[in-house]
Amino acid sequence: MENIERILKEHPFLEGMDEKHIKLLVGCASNVVFKAGEYIFREGEEADKFYFIRHGKVLVETFIPQKGPVIIRSRHEGEIFGWSWLVPPYKWHFDARAVELTRAIALDGKCLRGKCEEDHDLGYEIMKRFALIIAERLEATRLQLLDIYGNSSTK
Protein backbone atom coordinates (compact mmCIF):
# COMPACT_ATOMS: atom_id res chain seq x y z
CA MET A 1 0.00 0.00 0.00
CA GLU A 2 1.40 3.36 -1.02
CA ASN A 3 1.90 6.01 1.61
CA ILE A 4 -0.90 8.61 1.42
CA GLU A 5 1.31 11.28 2.97
CA ARG A 6 3.97 10.83 0.28
CA ILE A 7 1.37 10.90 -2.51
CA LEU A 8 -0.22 14.10 -1.17
CA LYS A 9 3.16 15.75 -0.57
CA GLU A 10 4.17 15.08 -4.20
CA HIS A 11 0.87 16.26 -5.72
CA PRO A 12 1.11 19.57 -7.65
CA PHE A 13 -2.03 20.93 -5.94
CA LEU A 14 -0.22 20.81 -2.59
CA GLU A 15 3.20 21.89 -3.86
CA GLY A 16 4.99 24.07 -1.32
CA MET A 17 2.48 23.39 1.45
CA ASP A 18 3.97 23.22 4.93
CA GLU A 19 4.64 19.64 6.02
CA LYS A 20 2.61 20.08 9.23
CA HIS A 21 -0.41 20.94 7.06
CA ILE A 22 0.13 17.89 4.85
CA LYS A 23 0.07 15.76 8.01
CA LEU A 24 -3.27 17.35 8.99
CA LEU A 25 -4.67 16.50 5.53
CA VAL A 26 -3.54 12.89 5.88
CA GLY A 27 -5.78 12.62 8.96
CA CYS A 28 -8.79 13.28 6.68
CA ALA A 29 -7.63 11.09 3.76
CA SER A 30 -8.49 7.59 2.58
CA ASN A 31 -7.89 5.46 -0.51
CA VAL A 32 -11.01 4.83 -2.62
CA VAL A 33 -11.73 2.80 -5.76
CA PHE A 34 -14.57 3.31 -8.23
CA LYS A 35 -15.62 0.80 -10.90
CA ALA A 36 -16.27 1.83 -14.49
CA GLY A 37 -19.74 3.38 -14.71
CA GLU A 38 -20.01 3.99 -10.95
CA TYR A 39 -21.29 7.38 -9.81
CA ILE A 40 -18.97 9.03 -7.31
CA PHE A 41 -21.52 11.69 -6.44
CA ARG A 42 -24.83 13.01 -7.77
CA GLU A 43 -26.10 16.56 -8.11
CA GLY A 44 -27.98 17.70 -5.00
CA GLU A 45 -26.40 15.15 -2.66
CA GLU A 46 -24.32 16.21 0.31
CA ALA A 47 -20.85 17.28 -0.82
CA ASP A 48 -18.62 15.67 1.75
CA LYS A 49 -15.33 14.91 -0.06
CA PHE A 50 -12.88 15.95 -2.71
CA TYR A 51 -10.62 13.66 -4.69
CA PHE A 52 -7.07 13.33 -5.96
CA ILE A 53 -7.18 10.95 -8.95
CA ARG A 54 -4.30 8.48 -8.82
CA HIS A 55 -5.40 6.39 -11.80
CA GLY A 56 -8.41 6.44 -14.11
CA LYS A 57 -10.84 8.90 -15.62
CA VAL A 58 -13.87 10.70 -14.22
CA LEU A 59 -16.55 12.63 -16.11
CA VAL A 60 -18.26 15.60 -14.51
CA GLU A 61 -21.76 15.82 -15.96
CA THR A 62 -25.07 17.59 -15.67
CA PHE A 63 -28.50 16.35 -16.67
CA ILE A 64 -30.46 18.39 -19.20
CA PRO A 65 -34.13 17.49 -19.69
CA GLN A 66 -34.89 16.18 -23.19
CA LYS A 67 -31.15 15.76 -23.77
CA GLY A 68 -29.91 13.58 -20.92
CA PRO A 69 -26.46 13.70 -19.32
CA VAL A 70 -24.08 16.28 -20.78
CA ILE A 71 -20.35 16.12 -20.08
CA ILE A 72 -18.96 19.30 -18.54
CA ARG A 73 -15.35 18.19 -17.99
CA SER A 74 -13.24 15.09 -17.73
CA ARG A 75 -10.69 14.58 -14.98
CA HIS A 76 -7.66 12.31 -15.23
CA GLU A 77 -4.72 10.94 -13.26
CA GLY A 78 -2.98 13.68 -11.30
CA GLU A 79 -6.00 15.99 -11.20
CA ILE A 80 -8.39 16.85 -8.39
CA PHE A 81 -12.14 17.31 -8.47
CA GLY A 82 -14.96 18.23 -6.14
CA TRP A 83 -14.91 21.65 -4.51
CA SER A 84 -18.53 21.84 -3.31
CA TRP A 85 -17.47 20.50 0.13
CA LEU A 86 -15.91 23.93 0.70
CA VAL A 87 -18.94 26.19 0.12
CA PRO A 88 -22.25 26.07 2.02
CA PRO A 89 -24.76 24.50 1.61
CA TYR A 90 -22.24 21.69 0.81
CA LYS A 91 -24.28 20.15 -2.02
CA TRP A 92 -22.92 18.81 -5.30
CA HIS A 93 -23.71 20.96 -8.34
CA PHE A 94 -22.98 18.19 -10.87
CA ASP A 95 -22.68 14.42 -11.17
CA ALA A 96 -19.31 12.67 -11.28
CA ARG A 97 -18.93 9.23 -12.82
CA ALA A 98 -15.92 6.96 -13.25
CA VAL A 99 -15.62 5.85 -16.89
CA GLU A 100 -12.93 3.31 -16.11
CA LEU A 101 -11.52 1.76 -12.96
CA THR A 102 -10.47 4.78 -10.95
CA ARG A 103 -8.29 4.89 -7.86
CA ALA A 104 -8.23 8.09 -5.84
CA ILE A 105 -7.48 9.59 -2.49
CA ALA A 106 -10.62 11.06 -0.91
CA LEU A 107 -10.36 13.86 1.61
CA ASP A 108 -13.28 14.10 4.00
CA GLY A 109 -14.68 17.62 3.70
CA LYS A 110 -16.22 17.82 7.17
CA CYS A 111 -12.95 16.66 8.76
CA LEU A 112 -10.99 19.14 6.67
CA ARG A 113 -13.35 22.04 7.42
CA GLY A 114 -12.84 21.32 11.13
CA LYS A 115 -9.06 21.32 10.76
CA CYS A 116 -9.23 24.59 8.81
CA GLU A 117 -11.30 26.17 11.61
CA GLU A 118 -8.70 25.05 14.16
CA ASP A 119 -5.73 26.15 12.03
CA HIS A 120 -6.54 29.27 10.02
CA ASP A 121 -3.17 29.12 8.25
CA LEU A 122 -4.21 25.74 6.84
CA GLY A 123 -7.63 27.18 5.92
CA TYR A 124 -6.00 30.07 4.07
CA GLU A 125 -3.70 27.69 2.15
CA ILE A 126 -6.63 25.49 1.15
CA MET A 127 -8.76 28.48 0.09
CA LYS A 128 -5.94 29.98 -2.02
CA ARG A 129 -5.41 26.69 -3.82
CA PHE A 130 -9.11 26.06 -4.45
CA ALA A 131 -9.67 29.67 -5.54
CA LEU A 132 -7.12 29.08 -8.34
CA ILE A 133 -8.87 25.84 -9.36
CA ILE A 134 -12.31 27.50 -9.35
CA ALA A 135 -11.02 30.46 -11.38
CA GLU A 136 -9.41 28.11 -13.94
CA ARG A 137 -12.60 26.11 -14.27
CA LEU A 138 -14.76 29.22 -14.66
CA GLU A 139 -12.45 30.41 -17.45
CA ALA A 140 -12.67 27.00 -19.13
CA THR A 141 -16.47 27.18 -18.90
CA ARG A 142 -16.43 30.66 -20.41
CA LEU A 143 -14.36 29.37 -23.33
CA GLN A 144 -16.76 26.44 -23.78
CA LEU A 145 -19.70 28.85 -23.90
CA LEU A 146 -17.90 31.07 -26.41
CA ASP A 147 -17.27 28.02 -28.55
CA ILE A 148 -20.92 26.93 -28.35
CA TYR A 149 -22.63 30.31 -28.68
CA GLY A 150 -19.95 32.52 -30.20
CA ASN A 151 -19.73 30.65 -33.52
CA SER A 152 -23.24 31.36 -34.71
CA SER A 153 -23.16 33.29 -37.94
CA THR A 154 -25.67 35.92 -38.91
CA LYS A 155 -26.75 36.07 -42.55
Image (cartoon, rainbow, N blue to C red):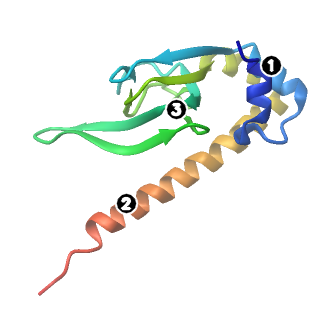
Front residue of 28/7: it is 7
Quarter that holds the C terminus: bottom left
Q: What x and y, as percent, mark residue 134?
A: 56, 47
* Residue 14 seen in render: yes
Sequence order check, earlier mark of 2 and 3: 3
Residue drawn at x 51%, y 51% is: 137
For residue 149, which quarter of the picture? bottom left
In the picture, residue 54 is in which quadrant?
A: top right
Residue 101 vs residue 131, the one in the foreground:
101
Question: Within 10 angstroms of label 2, few (less than 14), some, or many (20 or more) residues?
Answer: few
Location of residue 85 by image quarter:
top right
Q: Residue furthest bottom?
A: 155
Please report contact status of discs 1 and 2: CB closer than 8 Å, yes or no. Answer: no
Q: How far apart are the alpha carbons under marks 1 and 2?
A: 37 Å
- What's the mark number on residue 69? none
Residue at disc 1, secondary structure = helix
Instruction: Check disc 1 and report the residue beneath it.
Output: 24
Q: Which residue is mark 2?
A: 144
Quadrant containing the N terminus in the rendered view = top right
Residue kind at label 2, given as amino acid type: Gln
Tag 2 near tag 3, CB within 8 Å = no
**Residue at image coords 14%, 42%:** 67
Q: Residues within 10 Å of mark 1 (few under 14, many from 20)?
A: some
Q: Mark 1 or 2 closer to N-term?
A: 1
Question: What kind of residue is marked 1?
Answer: Leu
Q: How many marks?
A: 3
- Residue 82 is tagged as 3
Q: At 55% across and 30% down in the image, what residue appears?
A: 55
Q: CA distance from mark 2 to mark 3?
A: 20 Å
